[in-house]
Amino acid sequence: MITAKIIEDSISTSDKRITTFQLMYPRMIHSELMTHRVFSRNASSSRAIPVKKMIDMVRTEPAMPIHWGKNQPGMQAKEQLTGFDGERAKALWLSAAGNAADIAERMDKLGLHKQVANRILEPFQHIHVVLTATEFSNWFDLRAHPDAQPEIQEPAVKMREALHNSAPQELKEGEWHLPYIYVHEKVDQFFKLPENKLMLPRISAARCCRVSYLKQDGAVPSIEDDLALFQRLAGAVPIHASPLEHQATPDQMAFT
């Protein structure tokens, strides 16, 4: 399953737009997204998700190619395998996913940490990504292109459609672009107190780190949970700063 949805879309009074997406796509093409350096991004980690949960995901909904290209010279497979050969290719992929799940389960029983056992499952995982940027044109030119691998072309096309259909919220100087912060939190008077004005950006950073409003176990976090996670990120030595790249406020020219 490949999905792309906008979770926050803002524009400054000088017409500079910033957009945050939540994406899901096969992990096997994640490296292609990582080559685009204009993106700020955080992704679900094999080191964070319990092995049993990952095994269940691979067994019930493994990531698979969406185009079963026939072997030919060059980087693009224009023609697909069909008939028996196409069905056999899919069956072999599912068999490989099942074998990987079986081996990861045996590794888990041996007591291997998830940062080891989950690695063997990665070819069959979906990855969840939060991505923020102000520029998308080169991404769309390269990845929403017929020559792109179909598994990266589809999220790029869905992102382009979502961006076209979204109406960004205008932000004035001092207002914030805050992924994973919801309307009831933005209007809460508690967060408008001068001493609390930076709490929402910090909470947003914590949720971007998790690539979700929720915790890994699906529980709804408390404010204290989110602020404690932010402190572990920003207060760490060395600092873990990438989740702090998704929050922005406009100045007279752009977003900072």
Image (tube, grey):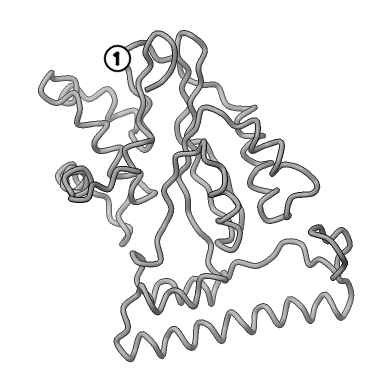
Q: Which residue is mark 1?
A: 174
- Which quarter of the rendering shows the N terminus? bottom right
12 vs 92: above or below: above
List x then y, in percent, for residue 83: 89, 76
- Residue type beneath disc 1: Gly
**Apparent side of residue 222 relative to residue 167 in the rendered image (left or right):** left
List x then y, in percent, for residue 211: 39, 49
Q: Residue at x 36, y 36 (%)?
A: 245
- Which quarter of the rendering shows the C terminus? top left
95 vs 241: above or below: below
Q: 44 and 164: which one is in front?
A: 44
Q: 137 and 156: which one is in front?
A: 137
List x then y, in percent, for residue 197: 18, 23
**Apparent side of residue 219 relative to residue 98 in the rendered image (left or right):** left
List x then y, in percent, for residue 49: 36, 66
The count of marks equals 1
Q: Residue at x 59, y 60 (%)?
A: 26
Q: Quadrant of residue 185?
A: top left
Q: Quadrant of residue 250?
A: top left
58 vs 162: above or below: below
Looking at the image, the residue that sits furthest to the left is: 195
Q: Residue at x 79, y 59 (%)?
A: 75
- Element at label 1: loop
**Apparent side of residue 86 relative to residue 61 in the rendered image (left or right):** right
Q: Residue at x 65, y 34 (%)?
A: 138
Q: Residues within 10 Å of mark 1 (few under 14, many from 20)?
A: few
